[in-house]
Image (cartoon, rainbow, N blue to C red):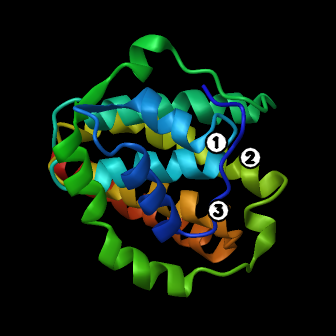
């Protein structure tokens, strides 16, 4: 994996980078994605996991939410432990989808990305630095533990994907308000899952 973490300032920039770096490949592996954004990019890795879980065609593939959960859990735990470079197992990095499926799913995010980026700005920075950053990592670990269950509860994985996307955007844009919204989204998602299972 690339030791040089890419710098992204907004969602459009990340989507464009993913689109360009995975073009002309028959299949897009998780390893290709991680290599393109760097193995020290906690925010972008969370954002990619959230986008893939949310994206039509990709997030609906059985097993994809669970794979994203493993990615989020491994990265979050390593951040909590103070690692600067994230290690991921080769069997996970080799997981892939067809390039056409990946491209259509990622490009679906282009239009909302434009409007999301207009709202993104530094604020409430205590929620995305120091203890706030670790709170985000712990919360993402808890989300990851719940995501395999979400595969059997229709639409619940969308709540997890939305929260991960918000946390990833918050870290990229240093926008603590988005992190706060991500925290507030979780009780509603948990309530929806419990309601569906009872």
Residue at label 2? 134
Query: Is residue 135 found left or right of 118 in the rendered image?
Result: right
Q: Residues within 10 Å of mark 1 (few under 14, many from 20)?
A: some
Residue 14 on image: x %, y %? 50, 59
Circles 2 and 3 in contact, beta carbons < 8 Å: no
User: Of 130 and 149, which appears nearest the observer?
Assistant: 130
Which mark is nearer the camera, 2 or 3? 3
Image quarter of residue 159: bottom left
Q: Is residue 66 visible?
A: yes
Q: Decide which of tag 2 and tag 3 comes sooner along the chain.
A: 2
Q: Secondary structure at mark 3?
A: helix
Circles 1 and 2 in contact, beta carbons < 8 Å: yes
Q: Tell which residue pokes out farthest to the front in this image.
A: 24
User: Of 22 and 160, which appears nearest the observer?
Assistant: 22
Q: CA distance from mark 1 to mark 3?
A: 18 Å
Quadrant showing the N terminus: top right
Image quarter of residue 15: bottom left
Q: Which mark is residue 138?
A: 1
Q: CA distance from mark 1 to mark 2?
A: 6 Å
Residue at label 3? 172
Q: Secondary structure at mark 1?
A: helix
Which mark is nearer the camera, 1 or 3? 3
Q: Taking 126 as reference, is 4 above or below it?
A: above
Q: CA distance from mark 2 to mark 3?
A: 15 Å
């Amino acid at each position: 994996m690339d030791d040089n973490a890419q710098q992204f300032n907004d969602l459009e920039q990340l989507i464009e980078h993913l689109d360009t770096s995975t073009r002309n490949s028959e299949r897009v592996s998780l390893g290709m994605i991680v290599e393109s954004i760097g193995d020290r990019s906690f925010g972008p890795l969370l954002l990619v996991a959230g986008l893939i879980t949310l994206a039509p065609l990709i997030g609906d593939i059985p097993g994809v939410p669970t794979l994203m959960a493993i990615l989020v859990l491994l990265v979050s735990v390593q951040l909590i432990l103070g690692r600067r470079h994230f290690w991921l197992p080769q069997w996970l990095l080799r997981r892939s989808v067809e390039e056409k499926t990946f491209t259509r799913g990622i490009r679906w995010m282009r239009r909302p990305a434009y409007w999301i980026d207009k709202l993104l700005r530094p604020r409430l920075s205590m929620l995305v630095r120091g203890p706030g950053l670790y709170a985000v990592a712990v919360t993402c670990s808890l989300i990851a533990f719940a995501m395999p269950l979400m595969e059997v509860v229709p639409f619940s994985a969308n709540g997890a994907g939305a929260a991960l996307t918000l946390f990833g955007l918050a870290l990229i844009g240093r926008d603590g308000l988005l992190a706060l919204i991500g925290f507030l989204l979780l009780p509603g998602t948990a309530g929806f899952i419990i309601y569906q299972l009872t």
